[in-house]
Amino acid sequence: MVQVLKKNKQQKDPNSVFEALSRSSDFTNELSRSEGFLYRISFFRSLINGHLLHEQILPFMKELQLTPTLEELKERIPIEQSVITTDLKEVEKALHRGNMAIRLETDWGKALLIPIEEKKGRQVGPPEIEFGIISAQEAFVEVLDTNLNLVRRRLPTPNLKVSEKTVGTLSQTKVAVLYIEEIANPANIETVLQRIEDIDFDQILDANYLSQMLYDVSNTIFPLFLNTERPDRVSSGLSEGKIAILVDGSPHVLLAPTILLEYFSTMEDYNMPWIAASCFRLLRIFAVIFSIFATPLYVAVLTFHYELIPKDLLETIVSSRYLVPFPPIIEALFLEISIELLR
């Protein structure tokens, strides 16, 4: 019984979290004194914005002459989304996301969490995979807030809802689910949110990790999510009732539900007359069908149905294959493997 009480007391000790984090060399847990009172500031140097810390927070703390409360500090420090909490798990998660914690000597168990994260990443640039000539020249980046900004600028409607989840026991990756109310199917929204909550995995580093865990049938060879890097395509899909899944750290967005024909269309098709757009889509479908059946037809005709080949052409093919020591199927396999290696 005594051991249980000691264990509970240790769990409630507010210094236990900060002492554990202090084992990392990039963690600062500094005790400072202002006019007549003590306070502690805690943060990861590798995650915070040093300019905000030294220009807006530390000078303000040193100018205080009377012992303040955390509520007063929250009102006077000009940084949004600051919160006061006594939950040690929330404090630990916030510190790992670039927040700093301020604690006063009047109550070491309560902390003011101030978001001063240093968001580093590449600038928004043109798409590299879904390149277009007469369409928007913007692509998603690895920062989640930037990607949300690219979508909201195209859909400035209050019906656009964002639901954020945290997945990955180690990575603690933020995942945002976007949909438009009154357009998206509520059953699909509930299914996606529930499946994301049920994910039990150590780390989620990319949107493709997530797609494999949300499939209805894991053994299918067909993609069940549309993977895109274009904000305009995501905005178009949301307006059609689809659900978008954004993963922090990934420049790709998943759209669901989707059908096979959507993989043969591009955003440029919407920027040209319907006749030209339809011709391009039919051309893409023909190219896929030709790439799938061209090699099998070649092997079948040369091996079993050579009577289908015109006589003049057959003589040329026979003479060209006279010195080839392999049958047509081995020749075709070598060709396909060579193409894949080059690709």
Image (cartoon, rainbow, N blue to C red):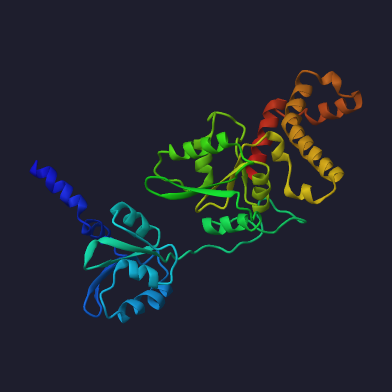
Q: Position of residue 178 (x, y in %)?
A: 57, 47
Q: Nearer the viewer, residue 219 or 101?
A: 101
Q: Is residue 170 left or right of residue 261?
A: left
Q: Residue at x 65, y 37 (%)?
A: 258
Position of 120 relative to 198 (above/below): below
Position of 122 relative to 225 (above/below): below
Q: Quadrant of the N terminus?
A: top left
Q: Quadrant of the C terminus?
A: top right
* Residue 103 can be seen in this image: yes
Q: Is residue 287 left or right of residue 253?
A: right
Q: Residue at x 75, y 32 (%)?
A: 289
Q: Is residue 70 left or right of residue 155?
A: left
Q: Nearer the viewer, residue 220 or 56?
A: 56
Quarter holding residue 332? top right
Quarter holding residue 72? bottom left
Query: Total label count?
Result: 0
Q: Position of residue 313 (x, y in %)?
A: 88, 28
Q: Position of residue 95 (x, y in %)?
A: 35, 59
Q: Residue at x 43, y 37 (%)?
A: 198
* Residue 143 can be seen in this image: no
Q: Nearer the viewer, residue 110 or 123?
A: 110
Which residue ends up furthest to the left in the rendered image?
A: 2
Quarter holding residue 65? bottom left
Q: Residue at x 22, y 56 (%)?
A: 16
Position of 171 relative to 99 (above/below): above
Q: Position of residue 169 (x, y in %)?
A: 37, 45
